[in-house]
Amino acid sequence: MKLLPKLGRRVVTEPGEVALHARNVRFDWSKTAPVWMKDEPVASHVLNALSMLLPEGERMFLVTFGEALELVKDEKLREAMIGFIGQESMHAESHNGALEEVLTAHGIDVEPYVRQTEYIFRKTLGPRDDLTTEAARQQHLVERLGFIATLEHFFAFLGDWILNADLERFDTDPQMLDLFRWHGAEEVEHRMVAHDVAEYFSVGYVRRCALMLVVFPIFIALLVRGTKYLAHQDPNLPNHRYPMLILRIFAAMWRGALPGIPSLLYSALTVFKPAYTPEPVGSSAQAIAYLAQSPAARMMAS
Ligand SMILES: [Fe+2]
Ligand SMILES: [Fe+2]
């Protein structure tokens, strides 16, 4: 049993394998502004950009796992995949709700960016009708499963970061913080699933490393582009050109309002270890402890 000195001074133990299930959540967005960390407008835009990317990305996960599920004979893995699908579905809809009720409700046009993410995730990474042989379809599925495992590494990293980051000191809206922490905690909780599926479908070491080399810069580029798109619509950020915006993002990282690039890069590089697993990326005990007291999850549980 591994001891984890997290959660302040409390010492918690890892719970071992946990059965995954989706938690119903509800958020009240009536008092939330788009700049939800008042002292950190650029960091708010970066995380809002993540909210614009996530729903389509996670819907692609659902479609792909739905396809893969038919081919999985291992009952334990199937159960984990079904739990994963339930959780990702709730994540996509909850972030979509935040987009509509916080960003769109405050006059921010998210549609052009969201349409682009739809194109990327549905056309480029979705199922393809033009593949005529079973072998080609299988190959395409395996590549998409490898891609999902790579993204899930980032999501577990980000989940672990947001569970531990002291964001309250930036005058932060508690609803939006709970959205990201609830989501982050479930990402930590289910961090092994996409990796186990990738192993089951023999994604393999070379493809895992190649996917990380491709996905890391694309993920960062899409996030920065989304941030610029939102900063462009923020009248309080007159200079939103890339050099100034990137400097502001680095400054927010320095203040701890965003995860730092060195730690993200270090985490990404761990996939190059032949014996890599996402197990050390966060603590299940900490994630489950957060989920037990997440206001949005408790509201629906009561
Ligand atoms: Fe998710
Ligand atoms: Fe996930």
Image: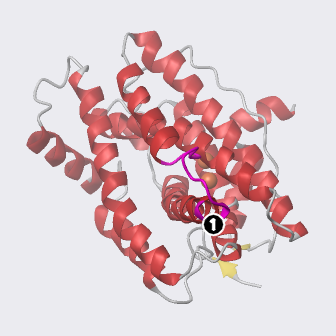
In this rendering, position of residue 164 left or right of residue 112: right
**Vertical order, 136 against 110 (above or below):** below
Using the rendered view, name the quadrant where residue 213 is placed.
bottom left
Residue carrying label 1: 135
Using the rendered view, name the quadrant where residue 113 is placed.
top left
**Vertical order, 234 against 175 (above or below):** above
Expressed as whole percent of the image width and height from the top left, the position of residue 18 reads 82, 65
Q: Give the range drawn in magenta.
A: 125-136
Q: Does the residue labelled 1 lie within 8 Å of ligand 2?
A: no
Using the rendered view, name the quadrant where residue 112 is placed.
top left
Q: Which residue lies furthest to the front in this view?
A: 132
Nearest the viewer among 288 and 96 is 96
Q: Quadrant of the N terminus?
A: bottom right
Q: Is residue 50 magenta?
A: no
Predominant secondary structure in magenta? loop
Q: Residue at x 21, y 52 (%)?
A: 250
Is residue 148 at least partly visible in the picture? yes
**Vertical order, 244 against 32 (above or below):** below
Q: Residues within 10 Å of mark 1 (few under 14, many from 20)?
A: few
